[in-house]
Image (cartoon, rainbow, N blue to C red):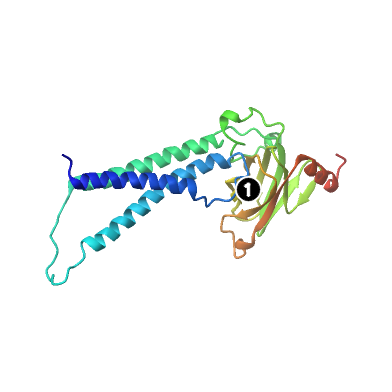
Amino acid sequence: MPKLSAIITLISSLILGIGGVWIAYNVDMLPVSASINAPVYDELYRVLFIIGCILFIGMTSLVIYSLIQFRRRPGETGDGINLEGNITLEIFWTAVPAIVVLFVGLYSYDIYDRMGGMQPLMHDHESQVENQAERIWGGIGSGPIETSSSNNSASLPIELTAMQFAFIFHYPKGDIITGELHVPVGREISLRMESKDVIHAFWVPQFRLKQDVIPGQPTILNFTPTKTGNFPIVCAELCGPYHGGMRSNVIVDEQEDFDYWLRENSKETI
């Protein structure tokens, strides 16, 4: 017959596991999902949240139990039992975290791959890169590799320049320069980004995407918005005393509204 302590441990583990899954799928602390990449990233968030809930609740419960069960009773004046060494326990608390860390690492890599992080970048800036003989670093595809097009000729190329403490966007089509990013919903956007001074970061929480903007080292970020609206752009890299104020907005419009904005602001005939 199994020991009572083993049964209690098994039941507690099951309750922790089920509770962690329930919390992860019923407590949503993320902002609205507004890009193709977001649902894929949210899978990783839920897995990490489940692991975090299990560890937090389990360890907190164990500490509270120990405080109650092993407290000093009235009249006790001596020291507790002198326990020294437990090979089984040491193997357990070494193996379990190692397995969890390995799993999280492999799963994170898989999520990054599915978001397009390992996908060769095909974008409209390539001809410029070849002409200027410069190296493009980093980037992410428009979505999961299995649903991505082999060429992104329909993508909208936009150039982003970051400086202390502003984001400036340039649209080659129409030669438009603006402090806000205007994009059409459902169309892939190809951002070519470069900094004029220090390292900045382009981060849109609703898109679940962040990419460093590096001086002298262009970076590329491809994404496809899926919801119309006004979403904040945040610099997520400490870039100076007014770093907290380095913000802008990405305005996602329907295609017709975006075309109207493009015509109204274009310096060329479109």
Residue drawn 67% across and 40% down? 190
Task: Report the side of 189 relative to 98 (left or right).
Answer: right
- Considering depth in this image, is 263 or 58 the residue closer to the camera? 58
Mark 1 closeness class: few <14, some 14–19, many ≥20 residues within 10 Å? some
How many discs mark residues in the rendered view?
1
Task: Report the side of 112 relative to 247 (left or right).
Answer: left
SS for callout 1: loop
Give, as a three-letter code, the residue at label 1.
Gly
Q: Dividing the picture into quarters, in which one does residue 33 lie?
A: top right
Residue drawn 42% across and 44% down? 21
Q: In what quadrant of the picture does the N terminus appear?
A: top left
Q: Where is mark 1, residue-wise?
A: 216
Task: Report the side of 50 relative to 177 (left or right).
Answer: left
Residue 28, given in percent of the width and then of the height, sits at 52, 50
Residue 138, given in percent of the width and then of the height, sits at 57, 41
Residue drawn 49% across and 48% down? 26
- Considering depth in this image, is 40 or 20 the residue closer to the camera? 20
Residue 107, given in percent of the width and then of the height, sits at 44, 38
Residue 202, given in percent of the width and then of the height, sits at 62, 50
- The reply to whether residue 152 is visible in this rendering is yes
- Considering depth in this image, is 169 or 102 the residue closer to the camera? 102
Residue drawn 59% across and 59% down? 239
Q: Dividing the picture into quarters, in which one does residue 241 lie?
A: bottom right
- The reply to whether residue 213 is visible in this rendering is no
Q: Dividing the picture into quarters, in which one does residue 254 lie?
A: top right
Q: In what quadrant of the picture does the C terminus appear?
A: top right
